[in-house]
Amino acid sequence: MSEGISQPDRPQEMQGADHGAHADLFSKFDPLIQQREQLLAAGIEDPFSLVMEKVISPTRAICNGRDTILLGTYNYMGMTFDPDVIDAGVNALRDFGTGTTGSRVLNGTYQGHRDCEDALKEFYGMDHAMVFSTGYQANLGIISTIAGKGDYVVLDIDSHASIWDGCAMGKAEIVPFKHNDIEAMEKRLKRIPEGAGKLVVLEGVYSMLGDVAPLKEMVRVAKENGAMVLVDEAHSMGFIGENGRGVAEEQGVMDDVDFVIGTFSKSVGTVGGFCVSNHPKFEIMRLVCRPYVFTASLPPSVMATAATSIRKLMHGSNKRAHLWENSRTLHGGLKALGFALGTDTPQSAIIAVIMPDLERGAMMWEALLTEGLYVNLARPPATPANMTLLRCSLCAEHSEEEVQTILGMFERAGKAVGII
């Protein structure tokens, strides 16, 4: 012990530590560990440790040695195996190597990063675009940088974890409101002190239930109350809206949205995140946004695949139409079989099938995997209202025959487990 610190002045916790009474920092996870062990003890395969031994196409893979239809990958537009996208990545890998080994503000900006940002500006028709290493970092960085101490962030209670984490990191006052409730949002905005900085954060499509936000009304209310608006279009980019720009485009409010956040890991088919904006001061974000400044930039091969994919999505109207057809067919078929679904009508490429509880949800997940179908098992606290969901993500590359096969698999598994 260093001189000048007498024993009685030390914190109680430190005094206890001398006698071997160490707190286990992992003890907070014990309920979850126990829940997982109970599922595995019941003979159910771990739903969160599935290994794909070989990926054959955007819609099929070998899982546990078996040909499996993929219905839980967010590969909405099926771009992961597009020949032009793959060729662009291979060429960039050969020409620029495997990585940048640096941050965007130092040595990590290659020609491909600028080209990808240009592709985003073309796609969205906006003045500024900024690429992040992941979609999570895009929300974390933009929200925490523009909304700091003394500012207010008004957000939907069902917002993605990256949005909540961005609020926490920026130390702004967080004001949540009931999911998709315009009136509740307006009440919260009106209570914020006059003159305070205000940011409203919304999502176009919410990833758990696949439901769409009433952006037209919400953006109007936000603007009437002097707030800036950020919309996360991660799950709508590529297939919602006339040009695939998302729910803001479809509902006619693109010009009123200050920031659009998105990801490359869904419709674009690779990895990374971005923010586009028309704000005249936006470029300063490159110097003040910590999750952008203090992390390595994406490899040139990833940038080349993203830019090529984004430009192809500009001409993806036929793919979008087929994806909507798939969504309507699967939603209608599951409803007819008697499954409880997250939305009354198909609103996106996500269809959530509500399970009675986690145990039967895991049993149903395993029964579907045995049938040769992979879906996501989603559980609390990630899900709203403590629901257990089987989340289906359709792809534009799923054929009509595959969708019918999927319905047959759901029927057999649902009857076997006693869900229907």
Image (cartoon, grey):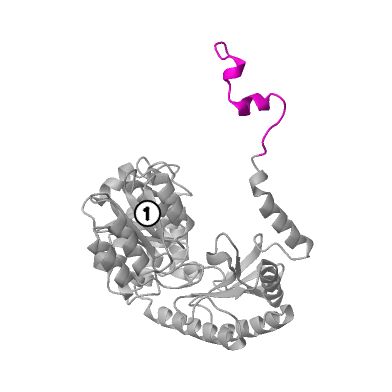
Left or right: residue 401 versus residue 313 is: right
Q: Please report the residue visible at 35 percent of the width from the left and 63 percent of the height from the top.
A: 185
Q: Please report the residue visible at 37 percent of the width from the left and 51 percent of the height from the top.
A: 143
Q: Which residues are magenta?
A: 1-24
Outermost residue toward the top?
Answer: 3
Q: Is residue 387 above or below residue 413?
A: above
Label 1: few (<14), some (14–19) or many (≥20) C-alpha neighbours in 10 Å: many
Quadrant (top left, top right, bottom left, bottom right) of the N terminus? top right
**Exactly how many numbered labels are in the figure?**
1
Q: Main secondary structure of the magenta part?
A: loop
Secondary structure under badge 1?
strand
Q: Position of residue 378 (x, y in %)?
A: 59, 65
| Residue 23 in magenta stretch | yes
Left or right: residue 248 versus residue 5 is: left
Q: Position of residue 324 (x, y in %)?
A: 44, 81
Outermost residue toward the bottom?
Answer: 336
Q: Position of residue 330 (x, y in %)?
A: 54, 83
The residue that disc 1 covers is 131
Instruction: Name the amino acid type tagged 1.
Output: Val
Quadrant of the rendered image containing residue 287: top left
Please state which of residues 369 and 348 is positioned toward the viewer in this rendering: 348
Left or right: residue 179 versus residue 226 is: right
Quadrant (top left, top right, bottom left, bottom right) of the C terminus? bottom right
Q: Is residue 268 above or below residue 289?
A: below
